[in-house]
Image (cartoon, rainbow, N blue to C red):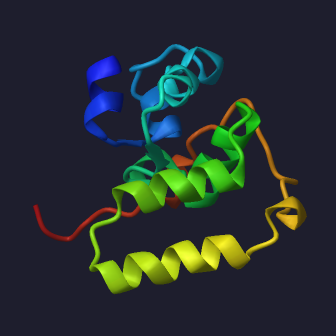
Amino acid sequence: MREAADRGIGFDICLISNMRLGATPSLEEHPITSFVAAGIHCSVSSDDPALLDTNLERDHAAARSLGLTPKQLYDAALAGVLCDDETRLALHQLADSHNWSDTLITRTTRDPPPIDRSRRTRSSTC
């Protein structure tokens, strides 16, 4: 972990996918909080929403339920974004001008909802 933090290597983490696919036994045991505590930038994403019945909102809610703040999530995503300097500056200015204390943290969950397989559609091609 120290090398990843020292080198500024960011991780794009899909919390619900990691649980559903067995990479971690539970949300509480996911190493994302250890990574963040070690200084590793961890952006949160969703992985294969159709298959895993998740979306970015659910993955961010899972991260918030572990104590990560919207500001931490924004900063981590900004650290890993590939963009030109002008865009990066604009994103930093946006963050600086935002009132993070007013950011709603209302939807959190410890356990993601079960996969709803009835919503899956089959592709007509193989």
Q: Is residue 114 left or right of residue 80?
A: right
Along the viewing direction, whichever of 20 and 1 lies nearer the viewer: 1
Q: Nearer the viewer, residue 40 or 105?
A: 40
Instruction: Identify the image quadrant of the N terminus.
Output: top left
Is residue 10 at all visible to an observer of this figure? yes
**x%, y% of residue 85?**
31, 79
Q: Position of residue 122 (x, y in %)?
A: 31, 62
In this rendering, is residue 37 above or below 8? Answer: above
Q: Position of residue 75 (x, y in %)?
A: 54, 56
**From the viewer's perspective, is residue 70 above or below residue 90?**
above
Could one spot residue 55 in this view of the protein? no
Q: What residue is drawn where x is 35% and y is 56%?
A: 80
Figure quadrant of residue 111: top right
* Image quadrant where residue 82 sits: bottom left
Q: Considering depth in this image, is 112 or 12 the residue closer to the camera?
A: 12
Res 33 quadrant in image: top right
The image position of residue 74, as x and y in percent, is: 57, 59
Above-or-below relation of 92 to 7: below
